[in-house]
Image (spheres, helix red, strand yellow):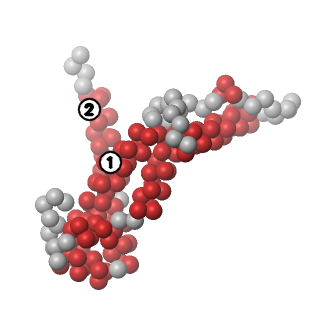
Amino acid sequence: DEQHGSSTLCDITALQALSRRVHYGKFVAESKYRADPESYKRLVDADDADGVMELLTNDAVERMVLKRARLKAATYGREPLLTAAIQMEAGTSETTSVVAAAAASAVVSAMEAMNGEHQQGKIDPLVMESIYRDIIIPLTKDIEVAYLFRRCGRDPPKEY
């Protein structure tokens, strides 16, 4: 149909947002460097990129990020349960009823996501979790390693 402009602009916007997201890793890397500069300098001087990667990796934080990504996809990736709007007592505003229904929807979504249940939505929470696990976190960590090498005055290995 030769109307690729709109989809191209959306793709560019998504890629720019992803780039911003993974480059936040530089701030994380700087914080970690300041907490233990000698260890990072020693590993970089030894050209040990795997050691730098291991030192900056915090498995507990990564698990928390994955859980949060899954929860947010479940909560914000589907329509609110407006059909289950809570009937309030007389005199209660419609706004209160809608807010209560949205809150109930968020709770149901969160419980389903944490239990690994499959649900209908705009995006499967497990897919969002896998995007973070397989793409976003590894890219972020690669940027952190490259940053730490440069921070210590060395060029990073070519794979970074």
Residue 8: give its label.
2
Q: Nearer the viewer, mark 2 or mark 1?
A: 1
- Residue that numbered label 1 is attached to: 134
Q: At x 34% / y 54%, what residue is drawn?
A: 137
Which quadrant of the view contains residue 91?
Answer: top right
> Is 125 drawn above or below residue 154 in the view shown?
above
Q: At x 75% / y 31%, what residue is drawn?
A: 86
Q: At x 16% / y 73%, what residue is drawn?
A: 47
Name the spot of residue 152 as percent of width and height, x first: 22, 76
Query: Can residue 27 be seen in this snapshot?
Result: no
User: Could you say which is closer to the camera, residue 107 or residue 93?
Assistant: 107
Q: Amino acid at mark 2?
A: Thr
Q: Earlier in the sequence, mark 2 or mark 1?
A: 2
Q: Amino acid at mark 1?
A: Asp
- Distance from Cα at disc 2 to Cα at disc 1: 24 Å
Which quadrant of the view contains residue 114?
Answer: top right
For label 1, the crowd category at 10 Å Cα-Cα, with few meaning under 14, some 14 to 19 and many 20 or more, is: few
Which quadrant of the view contains residue 99?
Answer: top right
> Is 52 drawn above or below residue 21 in the view shown?
below
Residue 128 is left or right of residue 160, and the answer is: right
